[in-house]
Amino acid sequence: MIDLLTVGFLQRALLAGIMVSVLCGVLSVFVILRRMAFIGVGISHSAFGGVALGFLLGVPPLWTGVTFSVLVAIIIEWARKHSRIGEDAAIGILFSASMAVGVVLLHLSRTYNVDVFGFLFGNILAVARGELAEIFVLTVAALSVFFAFYKELVFLSFDEEMAWVSGVPVGMLRYVFMVVMAVVVIMSMYLVGIILVEALLVIPGATARNLTRHIRAMVMVSIAVSTGSTVGGLWLSYQLDLPSGAAVVLLLAVLFFFSILPHRLGRPLRAST
Amino acid sequence: MGDIAVQIRGLCVKYNGVPALEDIDLDIQEGSYVGILGPNGAGKSTLLKVILGLVKPSRGAVSVFGEPPERLRARGAIVGYLPQRPLGNPGFPVSVQDVVLMGRYGRLGLFRRVRREDREAAARSLERVGIGHLARRPVGELSGGEQQRVFIARALCVEPRLLILDEPTVSLDACAQDELYELVNRLKQEMGLTVLMVCHDVGAVSRFVDDVICINRRIHVHQPPPIGRLGLEQTFGCSVEYLFHGEVPHRVVRSHDD
């Protein structure tokens, strides 16, 4: 472990991973409580179109990805409110269409190479110094949003209509949440890739939900689960030479599995609540 | 009786072109206790939602304490509301105290943290409805009657002048229903509230309320009312706030002394 920490790219990977995991831990609680898991799938997969556009234009794929997924997030939220089709259908259409756009753009740019694979499945070990700074800035920004609107986000997750009646700016906060989610998804791409981002959005919160009864504890446990899985996953991938993103996701899945056990084994006679 | 708490003129509400409420005129005096009766789908909840600003009228004007509902909402501190299904997600991990504190969020506004006086207000509200001892329990683990008290406490925590209850007893057993009606009546007296309550229980309503509003949006489908408004006012010797006659029979209960 000591020599692991002295290697430069591993230090950066660990730092980036921890920042992303703390953020995902907080976000995941709201994704679970507001039942937004599928929106996460939609936003993350849509990012593929933006990333491919970056490759085609020769600009950093992170920024085209962020732009693209923020746009998709806003369209999903708009469609939910104003269109006849449901939110789920809107997500299905947007994410498959953006991925198709991504495939076409990649074909045009003829760079279906390792870089692309990194965006699909994560390549945290390749995080550069500049990218680390970007991740830091975005993490601080996203955490400030959660901190500033925490009480309103809890209220509108609990009862949106009541929150509205009480004067909480529900419409604005829904957009803010979607944009933050899009930003977090893009950053998580470094760690686990577009395809596996969903794990970080859903599993920490779901695991914490199984283990806690109060939202404050849920946030803490969720952060611990995601951070623990990231650190553990990176260590495993280093020791056993496994792909790091997949190792993190597998650890998350194992933790979730263990979080179900007390419910199934400890209280077999009680109706599930 | 002083000011007018709720004033509605020429109100029409349509959902996708289908009228839910038509031609409603209504005055509710401050300090009165009004029951709203009507069959399912008659527009009772819609009327409440118009008063809360949740539903925009297709036509007509609504004012609550002399202001449009949207402006009132922005200040977040005059109307207490108990929705029909206040606990949409029973597994939501918050305590009773957290839920009651949500009643303060509107008046606190964005970026402001919950202060000690908010906690004290929440504790007082819980004591008022008789469940101070449940403050730390997860709200999903309480009984139906206790949960309704929690949400009434949240509505009181707003420090409202108008309390709006949408079928507060619908999921309760007979005993808990009576307790809840008694509680609302007591709160109204103690806090000088104007209360607006949608209810199916004609018997219970007649014991407490000052006025009854009968709603049936389907007035447009049917014959002209068998009894006109004037006739009713003469019959009861008081102003019946408003009355629709549709195919579903209803009763107007309790006349006034004045």
Image (spheres, rainbow, N blue to C red):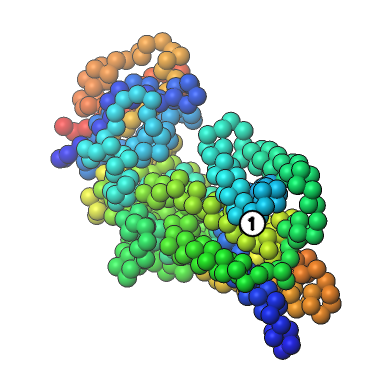
The residue closer to the viewer here, B68 or B125, is B68
**What is the residue that sits farthest to the top in this orientation?**
B223
Percent position of residue A57, x then y:
66, 48
The residue closer to the viewer here, B80 or A155, is A155
The residue closer to the viewer here, A74 or B54, is A74
**Residue type at mark 1?**
Pro
**What is the residue that sits farthest to the bottom in this orientation?**
A2
Query: In the rendered view, does A26 fall on the left or right side of B205?
Result: right
Residue at 62%, 61% (x, y): give it.
A187
The residue closer to the viewer here, B169 or A36, is A36
Residue at 68%, 38% (x, y): give it.
A93
Residue B14 to residue B29: above or below: above
**What is the residue that sits farthest to the front in this orientation?**
A58
Which quadrant does the C terminus of chain B fall into?
top left
Q: Secondary structure at mark 1?
A: loop
The numbered mark 1 sits on a residue in which chain?
Answer: A
Percent position of residue A185, x then y:
63, 57
How many other residues sit within 10 Å of disc 1, few (<14), some (14-19) or many (≥20)? few
Residue B207 to residue A9: above or below: above
Percent position of residue B121, x then y:
31, 64
The residue tagged 1 is A60
Residue at 25%, 16% (x, y): give it.
B231
Which quadrant does the N terminus of chain B fall into?
top left
Percent position of residue A116, x then y:
76, 56
Residue B154 appears in the rendering: yes
Query: In the rendered view, does B225 fall on the left or right side of A119?
Result: left
Residue B175 appears in the rendering: no
